[in-house]
Image (spheres, rainbow, N blue to C red):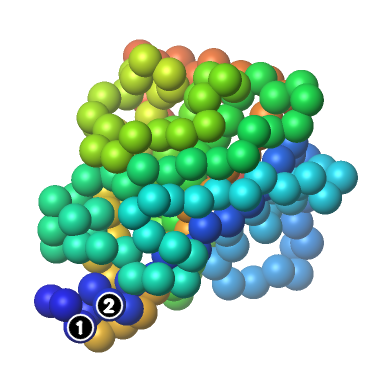
Amino acid sequence: MKSVMSKVVAGLSFAALCAFGASAADTGPKLAKELVPARGNQKIIVTSPAFAGGDSIPDRYTQNGDNMSPSIEWAKGPQGTRSYVLLAEDAGVANPDSIVHWVVYDINPAVTRLAQALPTDAKLDIANQGKNVAGKMGYVGPKPPAGQAHPYHFEVFALNTRLNLDRRRPTALRLSPR
C-alpha cells in the first residue's frame, strides 16, 4: 500500500477572480485553473500543513487511510472577493475532464483556512459542499489504480459573487469553457 500511495502527489495551486475561457483546441484533462484563468494575473497561494506541493499525500487523507479532508490554507483574495471555491482534482486520468475529489463553495470571504476532517454535510457553518466523483457530499480521498501515479491539485478561487446554488438539490460543480 505504501508504494502505491507514495505515487499520490499533491499540487497546491492558485486562482483568483475568475473569467471563463479556454481554447477549443485544448485536449486532455483540464484543471479548473486552466478553464477559469485568474484575471489580471492575480494569484492566491494555497498551502497545507499536512503536505507540501510535490510531496506524497499522507495515507490518512486517502481512501487507503482515514479518508479525511486535509487542512487547506490560502492567502486572502483580492479586494472585492465575495466568496471562495475550493476544488481538489485528479488530473492524472485519461479523460478530457479531471476527476473532482472535493468541492467547497460559497466559502465566507473572511475565511482563509479549512480545518482537516470536515464533515461531509452539504451545509457547513462557513460554506457549502458539492458532490465528489463518488456522487457523495464532501471530500473523497485519492486512490489511483495500483502502480499508477496521479497528480492531485488543491485549487482556491476568489469570486466576486456567491454561487448561491440550491442546497435542496445538491449537484456537482462543473466548470466548462464558454
Residue 65 or residue 143, whichever sits in front: 65
| Residue type, label 1 | Ser
User: Which residue was labeled with disc 2?
Assistant: 6
Instruction: Return the residue found at the far right.
Output: 40
Q: Residue at coordinates 75% horizontally, 56% vertically from top-left?
A: 22
Kindly check if marks 2 and 1 are in contact, taking CB atoms under 8 A apart as contact: yes
Does dot 2 land on a helix, a strand or a loop? loop
Residue 89 location (% of width, % of height): 45, 56
Q: Relative to residue 70, is residue 30 drawn left or right?
A: right
Q: Position of residue 131 (x, y in %)?
A: 35, 37
| Residue for point 27% across, 77% down | 6
Badge 2: few (under 14), some or many (20 or more) residues near its Cα, within 10 Å? some
The answer to whether any part of residue 96 appears in the image is no
Helix, strand or loop for disc 1: helix
Q: Residues within 10 Å of mark 1 (few under 14, many from 20)?
A: few
**Position above or below: 30 against 132:** below
Q: Quadrant of the C terminus?
A: top right
Amino acid type, callout 2: Ser
Does residue 119 appear left or right of residue 86 in this picture? left
At 43% from the left and 18% from the top, the residue drawn is: 126
Q: Position of residue 153 (x, y in %)?
A: 48, 59
Q: Residue furthest front?
A: 49
Residue nearest the viewer, comparing 90 with 71: 71
Tell me: residue 21, above or below residue 121.
below
Q: Which residue is mark 1?
A: 3
Position of the N terminus by quadrant: bottom left
Q: Is residue 83 left or right of residue 12?
A: right
Whether residue 82 can be seen here: yes
Tag of residue 64 = none
Name the quadrant containing residue 157. top right
Cα distance, mark 2 to mark 1?
5 Å
